[in-house]
Image (cartoon, rainbow, N blue to C red):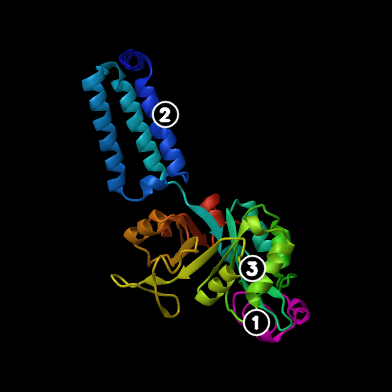
Amino acid sequence: MKKIFFFLHEKQLFSLFYVVLYSFLAVVFPKRGDFFLLNSISFFCVVFCCIIVVLLCVLYFDMHRNLVAFVALLLFACIVHAQGDAAPLVVAHRGGAAEGPENTLSCIENAILVGADAVEIDVRLTADGYLVACHDATVDATTNGRGRVSELTLEQVQALRVVDKNGAVTAECIPTLRQVLECVGGRCTVLIDVKRGGRDIEQRLVEDIAACGAQGWVSVQSFSDAVLHNLHELGAPFPLEKLVVFKVPFLPFVYDGSLRFFSFKKYDYISSFNFHKRCLSRSLAAKIRARGKGVKVWTVGSPADAPGVAVDAVITDYPSLWKCGETVE
């Protein structure tokens, strides 16, 4: 045994320690930087433990010549810690609403071309049961027509033409969810926001996603607990995300349009909590991520408007500002 330790201390003991530590972090904390994102105390605890281990090696194995390797290990830890501040993923809100007519195929295509990691769209049911990409309950603000989406057939909805932000009528119509998914074709992730429950919208959503083979590159978010619960009960084969405006400080409640009881156990099937950009604290974000959940913020403008909180993704109307540094005309 002494010969083994002598050989290792002369040749490879510190390298072995380095490999074991690195492998442990890689297996237990596979998501980039997650361990060091828990909080700064975790990071300094790791550094402190590294120092203690190396001091023991120095005292018992006379490893003075390997102190350089210890410095390298500390640098490695600092690099991993810095990865916690890596740029978040960019989600194009309503397809990138500031850079094209919202929720349209051209807007979504533009977001993909500028490098958005995901596009977010809103879906509602038409009178005849088709899912279409529309944020408002009516078509009044986004098309040259009038009426509630839920009271119009798909044919009536798609006979209308979308207007741009200047009020000019375009050649585009409101697309169906299937048309959006076929347009994206897995080139990025699609985050689907269900605006309203009822009328078996969850079942129709699962069917449309399955029909397009999009289960591996979509996720669904909603303010509605009922929508998310129903999708979970249906065994939806894609991530579910909870939209939140804010959490009440020091109390187990969140506001999402209504005041609701909040606990991580209640939302154990939720993959990400998506907060208003001004209503997420560092401590809450750290608690969520420590439980293996994602954190997104909405709706962020330019990078200068970003909250000072480490998050997984920003939902923005300006994907090109985050990806290219300039607005696409």
Q: Tell me the residue at 49%/64% (across/down).
A: 270
Please report the bounds of the magenta region as a residue range: 134-163
Three-letter code, disc 3:
Asn
Three-letter code, disc 2:
Val
Dot 2 corresponds to which residue? 19
Residue 127 showing in the rendered view? yes
Outermost residue toward the front?
A: 1
Dot 3 corresponds to which residue? 103
Q: Is residue 235 left or right of residue 283?
A: right
Residue at disc 3, secondary structure: loop
Q: Position of residue 86 (x, y in %)?
A: 44, 46
Answer whether residue 266 is magenta in the image. no
Nearer the observer, disc 3 or disc 1? 1
Dot 1 corresponds to which residue? 199
User: Is 74 situated above or below 238?
Assistant: above
The first of marks 2 and 1 along the sequence is 2
Q: Is residue 155 left or right of residue 245?
A: right
Crowding near the residue tagged with mark 1, few <14, some 14–19, many ≥20 C-alpha atoms within 10 Å: few
Q: Is residue 276 left or right of residue 316?
A: left
Name the image quarter holding residue 238: bottom right
Q: Which mark is residue 282?
A: none
